[in-house]
Image: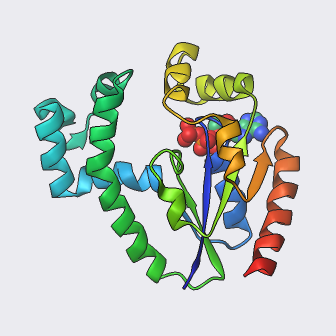
Amino acid sequence: MMIVVGLTGGIGSGKTTVANMFHKLGVPIYIADLEAKKLMTSSKIIKRKLIQLFGEEAYTDGKLNKPFLSGKIYNDKKLLLKMNAIVHPKVRSHFNRWLKKQNTPYVIKEAAILFENGGYHECDYVITVIASEEDKIKRVILRDNSSAKKVKAIMNTQWSDAEKVKLSHFVINNDNLSETENQVKIIHQKILKLI
Ligand code: ATP
Protein backbone atom coordinates (compact mmCIF):
# COMPACT_ATOMS: atom_id res chain seq x y z
CA MET A 1 0.00 0.00 0.00
CA MET A 2 1.18 3.46 -0.91
CA ILE A 3 2.14 5.67 2.01
CA VAL A 4 -0.05 8.77 2.31
CA VAL A 5 1.43 11.80 4.02
CA GLY A 6 -1.19 14.38 4.96
CA LEU A 7 -0.12 18.01 4.74
CA THR A 8 -2.18 20.56 6.58
CA GLY A 9 -2.06 23.95 8.26
CA GLY A 10 -4.31 26.93 8.85
CA ILE A 11 -5.38 29.40 6.19
CA GLY A 12 -2.35 31.18 4.75
CA SER A 13 0.17 29.01 6.61
CA GLY A 14 1.79 28.02 3.31
CA LYS A 15 0.50 24.49 2.67
CA THR A 16 0.43 24.81 -1.10
CA THR A 17 3.84 26.49 -1.10
CA VAL A 18 5.22 23.57 0.95
CA ALA A 19 3.42 20.98 -1.21
CA ASN A 20 5.13 22.45 -4.28
CA MET A 21 8.50 22.04 -2.55
CA PHE A 22 7.77 18.32 -2.08
CA HIS A 23 6.71 18.15 -5.71
CA LYS A 24 10.10 19.53 -6.73
CA LEU A 25 11.65 16.55 -4.91
CA GLY A 26 9.56 14.19 -7.06
CA VAL A 27 6.68 13.54 -4.66
CA PRO A 28 3.21 13.45 -6.28
CA ILE A 29 0.92 15.99 -4.62
CA TYR A 30 -2.86 16.00 -4.37
CA ILE A 31 -4.29 19.41 -3.47
CA ALA A 32 -7.65 18.42 -1.97
CA ASP A 33 -9.13 21.94 -1.86
CA LEU A 34 -8.34 22.48 -5.54
CA GLU A 35 -9.77 19.10 -6.54
CA ALA A 36 -12.86 19.82 -4.42
CA LYS A 37 -13.45 23.05 -6.32
CA LYS A 38 -13.04 21.24 -9.65
CA LEU A 39 -15.46 18.50 -8.60
CA MET A 40 -17.99 21.10 -7.51
CA THR A 41 -18.22 22.08 -11.16
CA SER A 42 -17.73 18.73 -12.89
CA SER A 43 -19.73 16.32 -10.71
CA LYS A 44 -23.43 16.27 -11.57
CA ILE A 45 -24.30 14.75 -8.18
CA ILE A 46 -22.47 17.45 -6.23
CA LYS A 47 -24.02 20.13 -8.42
CA ARG A 48 -27.54 18.84 -7.82
CA LYS A 49 -27.03 18.62 -4.07
CA LEU A 50 -25.44 22.07 -3.79
CA ILE A 51 -28.34 23.60 -5.72
CA GLN A 52 -30.69 21.83 -3.30
CA LEU A 53 -28.79 23.33 -0.37
CA PHE A 54 -28.05 26.85 -1.65
CA GLY A 55 -30.50 27.39 -4.52
CA GLU A 56 -29.89 27.98 -8.23
CA GLU A 57 -27.56 30.88 -7.46
CA ALA A 58 -24.87 28.39 -6.44
CA TYR A 59 -23.92 28.29 -10.14
CA THR A 60 -23.80 30.95 -12.82
CA ASP A 61 -23.55 29.71 -16.41
CA GLY A 62 -22.71 26.27 -15.10
CA LYS A 63 -19.76 27.64 -13.14
CA LEU A 64 -19.45 27.59 -9.38
CA ASN A 65 -20.53 30.94 -7.94
CA LYS A 66 -17.72 31.25 -5.40
CA PRO A 67 -18.52 34.75 -4.05
CA PHE A 68 -22.14 33.69 -3.46
CA LEU A 69 -21.11 30.49 -1.68
CA SER A 70 -18.44 32.13 0.49
CA GLY A 71 -20.97 34.79 1.45
CA LYS A 72 -23.39 32.04 2.51
CA ILE A 73 -20.98 29.89 4.51
CA TYR A 74 -19.14 32.83 6.02
CA ASN A 75 -19.99 32.70 9.71
CA ASP A 76 -22.48 29.83 9.23
CA LYS A 77 -20.78 26.73 10.55
CA LYS A 78 -23.81 24.49 10.05
CA LEU A 79 -24.07 25.33 6.37
CA LEU A 80 -20.32 24.84 5.94
CA LEU A 81 -20.62 21.38 7.50
CA LYS A 82 -23.50 20.52 5.18
CA MET A 83 -21.51 21.63 2.14
CA ASN A 84 -18.52 19.60 3.30
CA ALA A 85 -20.73 16.54 3.78
CA ILE A 86 -21.71 16.81 0.10
CA VAL A 87 -18.25 17.47 -1.30
CA HIS A 88 -15.84 15.48 0.87
CA PRO A 89 -16.96 11.91 0.15
CA LYS A 90 -16.49 12.61 -3.58
CA VAL A 91 -13.05 14.10 -3.03
CA ARG A 92 -12.08 11.06 -0.99
CA SER A 93 -13.03 8.61 -3.74
CA HIS A 94 -11.41 10.82 -6.38
CA PHE A 95 -8.22 10.84 -4.28
CA ASN A 96 -8.29 7.05 -3.93
CA ARG A 97 -8.53 6.63 -7.70
CA TRP A 98 -5.63 9.09 -8.16
CA LEU A 99 -3.59 7.26 -5.52
CA LYS A 100 -3.82 3.96 -7.39
CA LYS A 101 -2.07 5.57 -10.36
CA GLN A 102 0.98 6.76 -8.39
CA ASN A 103 4.14 4.72 -8.11
CA THR A 104 6.48 6.58 -5.77
CA PRO A 105 7.39 5.57 -2.17
CA TYR A 106 4.84 8.06 -0.85
CA VAL A 107 2.43 10.82 -1.88
CA ILE A 108 1.39 14.10 -0.27
CA LYS A 109 -2.28 14.90 0.30
CA GLU A 110 -2.74 18.56 1.09
CA ALA A 111 -5.94 19.59 2.84
CA ALA A 112 -6.81 22.63 4.95
CA ILE A 113 -9.13 20.77 7.27
CA LEU A 114 -7.43 17.38 7.57
CA PHE A 115 -7.92 17.28 11.35
CA GLU A 116 -11.29 19.01 11.50
CA ASN A 117 -12.93 16.42 9.23
CA GLY A 118 -11.09 13.36 10.52
CA GLY A 119 -9.18 12.87 7.25
CA TYR A 120 -5.92 12.46 9.19
CA HIS A 121 -7.05 8.99 10.25
CA GLU A 122 -6.51 7.91 6.65
CA CYS A 123 -2.94 9.25 6.52
CA ASP A 124 0.17 7.32 7.54
CA TYR A 125 1.92 10.50 8.65
CA VAL A 126 0.83 14.09 9.06
CA ILE A 127 2.85 17.25 8.47
CA THR A 128 1.49 20.53 9.85
CA VAL A 129 2.65 23.86 8.50
CA ILE A 130 2.58 26.64 11.04
CA ALA A 131 3.20 30.38 10.89
CA SER A 132 2.38 33.32 13.13
CA GLU A 133 -1.17 34.61 12.99
CA GLU A 134 0.16 37.98 11.87
CA ASP A 135 2.05 36.44 8.92
CA LYS A 136 -0.91 34.28 7.89
CA ILE A 137 -3.30 37.24 7.83
CA LYS A 138 -0.82 39.42 5.94
CA ARG A 139 -0.19 36.71 3.32
CA VAL A 140 -3.86 35.99 2.65
CA ILE A 141 -4.73 39.68 2.37
CA LEU A 142 -1.92 40.03 -0.15
CA ARG A 143 -2.88 36.88 -2.08
CA ASP A 144 -6.69 37.21 -2.15
CA ASN A 145 -7.31 40.89 -1.61
CA SER A 146 -9.18 39.73 1.48
CA SER A 147 -9.63 41.51 4.81
CA ALA A 148 -8.26 40.68 8.28
CA LYS A 149 -11.84 40.24 9.47
CA LYS A 150 -12.61 37.61 6.82
CA VAL A 151 -9.35 35.74 7.40
CA LYS A 152 -9.99 35.67 11.15
CA ALA A 153 -13.53 34.35 10.60
CA ILE A 154 -12.08 31.42 8.63
CA MET A 155 -9.39 30.89 11.27
CA ASN A 156 -12.15 30.56 13.85
CA THR A 157 -13.59 27.56 11.99
CA GLN A 158 -10.19 25.79 12.02
CA TRP A 159 -8.32 24.04 14.83
CA SER A 160 -5.54 25.98 16.53
CA ASP A 161 -1.92 25.26 15.56
CA ALA A 162 -1.28 23.85 19.05
CA GLU A 163 -4.05 21.26 18.66
CA LYS A 164 -2.77 20.24 15.22
CA VAL A 165 0.87 20.05 16.31
CA LYS A 166 -0.01 17.60 19.09
CA LEU A 167 -1.30 15.08 16.55
CA SER A 168 1.37 15.66 13.87
CA HIS A 169 4.45 13.60 13.07
CA PHE A 170 6.27 16.57 11.54
CA VAL A 171 5.88 20.32 11.92
CA ILE A 172 7.18 22.90 9.46
CA ASN A 173 7.61 26.42 10.69
CA ASN A 174 7.04 28.46 7.53
CA ASP A 175 8.65 31.71 8.40
CA ASN A 176 11.48 32.13 5.94
CA LEU A 177 11.06 30.35 2.58
CA SER A 178 14.63 29.06 2.24
CA GLU A 179 14.50 27.61 5.77
CA THR A 180 11.16 26.05 4.90
CA GLU A 181 12.77 24.41 1.88
CA ASN A 182 15.50 22.96 4.12
CA GLN A 183 12.89 21.58 6.51
CA VAL A 184 11.09 19.98 3.55
CA LYS A 185 14.30 18.25 2.39
CA ILE A 186 15.00 16.91 5.89
CA ILE A 187 11.44 15.62 6.36
CA HIS A 188 11.51 14.04 2.88
CA GLN A 189 14.63 12.04 3.85
CA LYS A 190 13.10 11.07 7.20
CA ILE A 191 9.92 9.80 5.55
CA LEU A 192 11.92 7.77 3.02
CA LYS A 193 13.80 6.15 5.91
CA LEU A 194 10.59 5.43 7.83
CA ILE A 195 8.97 3.53 4.97
P1 ATP B 1 -4.93 28.41 2.06
O1 ATP B 1 -5.30 27.57 3.20
O2 ATP B 1 -5.57 29.75 2.13
O3 ATP B 1 -5.14 27.73 0.73
P2 ATP B 1 -2.07 27.87 2.13
O4 ATP B 1 -1.81 27.37 3.49
O5 ATP B 1 -2.09 26.86 1.03
O6 ATP B 1 -3.36 28.76 2.13
P3 ATP B 1 -0.21 29.34 0.47
O7 ATP B 1 -1.19 29.65 -0.59
O8 ATP B 1 0.86 28.35 0.18
O9 ATP B 1 -0.96 28.95 1.82
O10 ATP B 1 0.50 30.66 0.98
C1 ATP B 1 -0.26 31.85 1.22
C2 ATP B 1 0.41 33.03 0.55
O11 ATP B 1 1.60 33.34 1.26
C3 ATP B 1 0.82 32.76 -0.88
O12 ATP B 1 0.64 33.91 -1.63
C4 ATP B 1 2.31 32.41 -0.76
O13 ATP B 1 3.02 32.72 -1.91
C5 ATP B 1 2.76 33.23 0.43
N1 ATP B 1 3.79 32.60 1.26
C6 ATP B 1 3.87 31.31 1.61
N2 ATP B 1 4.93 31.08 2.41
C7 ATP B 1 5.55 32.28 2.56
C8 ATP B 1 6.71 32.72 3.29
N3 ATP B 1 7.45 31.87 3.99
N4 ATP B 1 7.03 34.01 3.23
C9 ATP B 1 6.29 34.88 2.50
N5 ATP B 1 5.19 34.54 1.79
C10 ATP B 1 4.81 33.26 1.83
Q: In this picture, is 194 found above or below 10?
A: below
Total count of labels: 0
| Residue at horizontal 62 percent and vertical 56 percent from the top | 7
| Residue at horizontal 16 percent and vertical 36 percent from the top | 53
| Residue at horizontal 55 percent and vertical 28 percent from the top | 155
The quarter of the picture showing ligand 1:
top right
| Residue at horizontal 33 percent and vertical 22 percent from the top | 71
- Percent from the top left, x then y, of residue 116? 49, 44
The answer, for residue 66, to whether it is visible in the render is no
- In this orientation, which residue lies closer to the viewer: 146 or 186? 186
Q: In this picture, is 62 found above or below 95?
A: above
**Quadrant location of the C terminus?**
bottom right
Colour scheme in the image?
A: rainbow
As drawn, is 149 to the left or to the right of 165?
Answer: left
As drawn, is 50 to the left or to the right of 138?
Answer: left
- Percent from the top left, x then y, of residue 62? 17, 44
- Percent from the top left, x then y, of residue 15? 64, 48
